[in-house]
Amino acid sequence: MAAKKMVPPNKSCVKRLRQAAKANAANRSTRSAIRTSLGVVRSAKTKEDALKEVPRLFSMMDKAAAKNRAGFSKNRASNYKAKVGHLLNKLAAKA
């Protein structure tokens, strides 16, 4: 059974739906870009390859945390940065 499409009862609800859709699109885009960049770093074979992507990744995470976008708080961004640092140390030790 298909769900009925609700008609918002007033103007403020219409605006809120518009704002939510816009925020959802921005969050999805940011989250996707961060995950893609993180995948590049994690799949790097050498530390040099990973270091090429790290500044871009850190920049995206910092911007997302500053805007509270894509579920990134400052602590979450910091935790991801620490994990990337550990990964870089492992790659350096492997070489």
Image (spheres, rainbow, N blue to C red):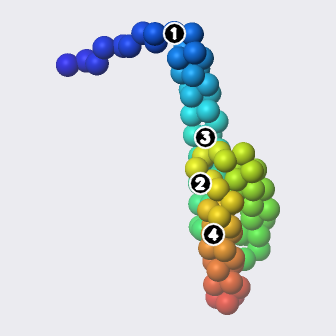
If you read the primary sequence from the N terminus, does the residue marked by circle 3 or circle 4 appear first? 3
State which mark lies toward you, 4 or 2.
4
**Whole-percent x and y of residue 81?**
68, 69
Circle 4 sits in a helix, a strand or a loop, which is it? Answer: helix
Q: Which badge, 4 or 1, is on the more N-terminal residue? A: 1
Question: Is label 4 in contact with label 1 (beta carbons under 8 Å)?
Answer: no
> What is the three-letter code of the residue carrying label 4?
Asn
Disc on the earlier residue, 1 or 2: 1
Disc 1 and disc 3: Cα gap in Å? 26 Å
SS of the residue under disc 3: helix
Residue 27 in view here: yes
- Which of the numbered marks, if any, corresponds to residue 56? none
**Secondary structure at numbered mark 2:** helix
Label 3 is placed on what type of residue? Asn
Q: Position of residue 1 (x, y in %)?
A: 20, 19
Label placed on residue 10: 1
Which residue lies at the image location 77% right of the left edge and 70% below the top edge?
51
Rendered residue at 75%/61% (across/down):
58
Q: Which residue is mark 3?
A: 27
Q: Which mark is residue 35?
A: 2
CA separation, marks 4 and 1?
Answer: 42 Å
Q: Separation of disc 3 and disc 2 at Cα? A: 12 Å
Tell me residue 41's x, y (percent): 65, 66
Q: Dots 4 and 2: beta carbons under 8 Å?
A: no
Question: Looking at the image, which residue sits at the far left?
Answer: 1
Between disc 3 and disc 2, the foreground one is 3
**Which amino acid lies under the numbered mark 1 shown in the image of this protein?**
Asn
Crowd rating for badge 2 (residues with CA inside 10 Å; few <14, some 14–19, many 20+):
few
Q: Which residue is mark 4?
A: 79
Q: Residue at x 57, y 10 (%)?
A: 11
- Using the image, determine if residue 77 lies above or below residue 12: below
Badge 3 density bin: few <14, some 14–19, many ≥20, Cα 10 Å: some
